[in-house]
């Protein structure tokens, strides 16, 4: 198949087994994640993950890239994340005895640049 957005759309909607080889060809030709991401939405990614988890994982990997950083010296992109309580108040506040466990929501951002917001 040609390396076009329409081919990717066809594979996403009708032939998920073809996604992995197609994405490998895209990587071999240096097609960037931002170029591919313009033609796939979060519903497409979720549908592929449900239908073919291996192809979905390849799709997520291909559509993901490290963003440029606004100021890497002062506010670098975080390399890890922890939801653990940081102090006694948070331990009490998020205690399963007093409150139900907090719901973790994930969402998709189209940002290409990491900007620190101290608010």
Image (cartoon, rainbow, N blue to C red):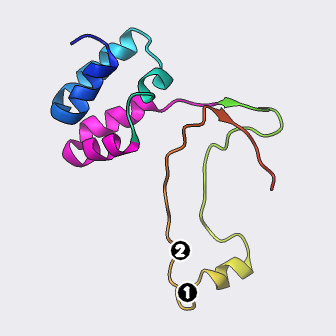
- Mark seen at residue 58: none
- Image point (21%, 35%), residue name: 13
Q: Nearer the viewer, residue 77 or 119?
A: 119
Instruction: Please tell me in which quadrant of the rendered image residue 60 appears.
Output: top left
Q: Are marks 2 and 1 in contact (CB under 8 Å)?
A: yes
On screen, residue 38 versus residue 74, left or right, reads: left
Residue 94 lies, in percent from the top left, at 60, 80
Q: Is residue 98 above or below residue 67?
A: below
Residue drawn where x is 49% and y is 70% of the image = 103
Image coords of residue 46 (percent x, y): 32, 47
Q: Is residue 17 magenta?
A: no
Q: Residue 99 shows which numbered tag?
A: 1
The residue that label 2 is drawn on is 102
Q: Is residue 22 left or right of residue 87?
A: left
Q: Quadrant of residue 113?
A: top right
Which range is magenta?
42-67
Q: Position of residue 92 (x, y in %)?
A: 66, 85
Q: State how far apart marks 2 and 1 are (Cα).
A: 8 Å
| Residue 29 image position (x, y, % from top left) | 39, 8
Magenta span contains residue 51? yes
Task: Identify the element where label 2 is drawn.
Answer: loop
The quarter of the picture where the C terminus appears is bottom right
- Looking at the rendered structure, the number of numbered marks drawn on it comes to 2
């Amino acid at each position: 198949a040609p390396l076009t957005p329409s081919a990717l759309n066809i594979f996403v909607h009708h032939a998920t087994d073809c996604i992995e080889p197609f994405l490998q060809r895209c990587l071999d030709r240096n097609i960037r994640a931002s170029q591919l991401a313009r033609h796939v939405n979060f519903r497409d990614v979720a549908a592929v993950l449900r239908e073919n988890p291996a192809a979905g994982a390849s799709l997520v990997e291909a559509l993901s890239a490290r963003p440029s950083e606004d100021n890497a010296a002062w506010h670098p992109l975080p390399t890890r994340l922890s939801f653990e309580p940081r102090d006694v108040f948070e331990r009490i506040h998020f205690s399963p005895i007093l409150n139900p466990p907090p719901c973790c929501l994930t969402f998709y951002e189209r940002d290409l640049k990491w900007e620190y917001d101290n608010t």
